[in-house]
Amino acid sequence: MKKLIHILFLLFPVVAFAQWTWQNPLPQGNILNSVYFTDTIHGCAVGESGTIVKTADGGAIWTLQNSGTTLRLNSVAFLNSSTGYAVGDFGTIVKTTDGGNTWNIINSGTMQHLFSIFFVDSLTGYIASDGGKMLKTTNRGQSWTMISTGTIDSFTDVFFVNINVGFAVGDDWDEILKTTDGGNTWTEQSDDNDEAYWSIAFTDTNHGIIVGSEGRILKTADGGTTWTSPSSGTTNALRSVHFTNPTTGYAVGDGGTILKTTDSGSTWTVLSSGGYIGYCSIIFPDANTGYIAGTCGSLMKTTDAGATWTSMLSGSTDYFASVCFPKPGTGYAIGASGTILKTTNGGDDWMTVSTGIGKWFYSGCFTNELTGYIVGDSGMIFKTTDAGITWRALSSGTTNALNAVYFCDSTVGYAAGGGGTILKTTNGGTSWNTQSSGISGMLHSISFPDEDHGYASGDNGSILKTTNGGADWTILQNGTLQQFFSVCFTSVNTGYITTGDDSILKTQDGGTTWSKTGITPGYSLLSIKFIDSNTGFVFGVGGGMFKTTDGGTTWNQLSSGTTNALWSIAFTSADTGYVVGSCGTILKTTNGGGYPMGVPNLTTNPSPVNIYPNPAKDKCKVQCAMCNIKSIEIFNLTGEKVYGADFSSGTGNAVEVDFDLRAGIYFVKITEEKEISVQKLIVE
């Protein structure tokens, strides 16, 4: 079983075509919510952004598969070696009939989030959903019927002991349900504990284990009538539990937690995983061979019943805060624990550069191919003059954390950070002088469009400006107390700042006045970068990425292919760029970041799915260039389906929809042969 990390960043998600490829870690770094193996060598794991990875050699090689969706996938299960299903957000179900090589979207008939899938036998399966709902199939998943459990709570896991007896648990307090008639009716089981439950497993009709928040483990020996709470030895949340036989079982969870029991769950031993990353799912295809999937794309394997675990993920999973390329092909990713990765072949390979320092670095820049600087905790400034082979500590004169470093040329540079710190060097870092910023708060970013004019941004709406190379700094008024993460000026007068919410500030008069541009709600914008006066990128939490080609007048959302936070970007040409972020994320684009969300990477087909008119009264047309619409469904804000039409043979790329709906906001779910789009419809 599994437990997803449930964070919604977009209210109205749409399918996109990722134009960024993973370079680190490999095969990818998105959260993997669920893993399933049909035998010891064939397996799949699914997760954020529609991620599916597959192995056919016991995990030695994992390959990314096209799921047909960028919506989160929460659970995966196979009926046999060929046929499997993965389920996810907004009613997403994808199916494979060739062992995971190809996946096709199938119609679920719901917009509810689907969290867990379980097959009792080759015909009968169940899907746990939110809103107290559950889906059931009795024909190998060809069709699914919605059944009610009598509650409105969300279910995180479902487990059936046989065709009649099953259990479901939820992330709401004290939620355990049992059925003895194949899901037709459900009764609540109480354990008198206020905990969230993530996963459940039974070895027979009487003996079962539930795991949940704060290391909670529940055990029953009478089919759920009563529950005891054995000690787990950890306070970390436990996300998944799996038994290999009636006595031997495993549980995994946050902080790299792996537990094992050999007495049916009465006592548990903490196993060493050698990691700290959160684990979401565990499965053992035989008594000795087991697999774990989790955050940052983590994949672990044991062949000795859990005594030792080996990572199947290559590359670093450290947090990267900065990326810079002094020349095309040669670049550096700077991050946590003193980690620096370097590439000399355009990112095909990244090697670790040792600094000998185990503290955090937040920013880096190079003035030429050989000379570079990195700054970080406790006022650290390091310099290399041999392309990163060795690094020498420089005296900064401060112990405040330094969040940004910027060099105007080979000798003149600036650093900014905590306590309103601004430092300047005029001799290539040999000495640094403190400049008076006039503030005491944190500064996050600094930008100089020329040697005299500079800007810095930080907490509490701080925007600073200098017109004399930092000799004096003026506090600019902007009418907000927002946290400003990043500042970028394309000229002396034109500049941009990202805020802690979902907006961008722009000035065209050197900071005297600022205008606000909104982005898709739900994204904290962490960094902004312009590669010329018109073309810029902004990105941040949840993998949010936006691009402008008209100097910030309009911004189009791009598909980054990840929900990891993105912190820094570097372009070596108009087409080739790199972005780094949490979980060791390093992504590369070779087409300028790709097309806006919903637009295929086809020059002959530049149009997204379109609904018009919108707002509408009693009809609308759904159009999708160069695609074949299979079904259209409309859902209200509570998730109830209020319209549905299936087109088994496809109906081309345009469908007229007649409806009789009350005025309000609705979701329209368009299912194509390989993709799903979910868009908003306003009915007047």
Image: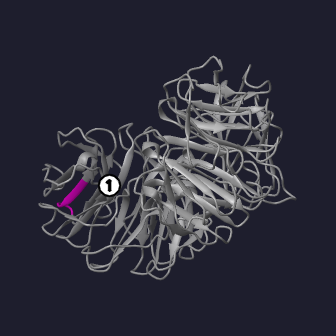
- Observer-nearest of 365 and 472: 472
- Quick one: 36 or 231, which is closer to the camera? 231
Q: Residue at x 50, y 58 (%)?
A: 392
The x and y percentages for residue 476 are 66, 20
Visible in this render: residue 301? yes
Q: Position of residue 75 (x, y in %)?
A: 45, 59
Picture quarter containing residue 518? top right
Highlighted range, magenta: 205-210
Viewer-side residue, 633 vs 667: 667
Q: Is residue 591 left or right of residue 426?
A: right
Give percent across and percent down for residue 47: 50, 58
Residue at the disc numbered 1: 255
Q: Could you tell me how many numbered marks the image carries?
A: 1
* 303 relative to 121, above or below: below
Which quadrant holds the N terminus? bottom left
28 relative position to 605: left or right? left
Q: Look at 27% across and 78% down and name the residue there.
A: 287
Which residue corresponds to the image point at 40% horizontal and 80% vertical from the top-left? 39
Q: Secondary structure at mark 1?
A: helix
Q: Is residue 252 left or right of residue 600?
A: left
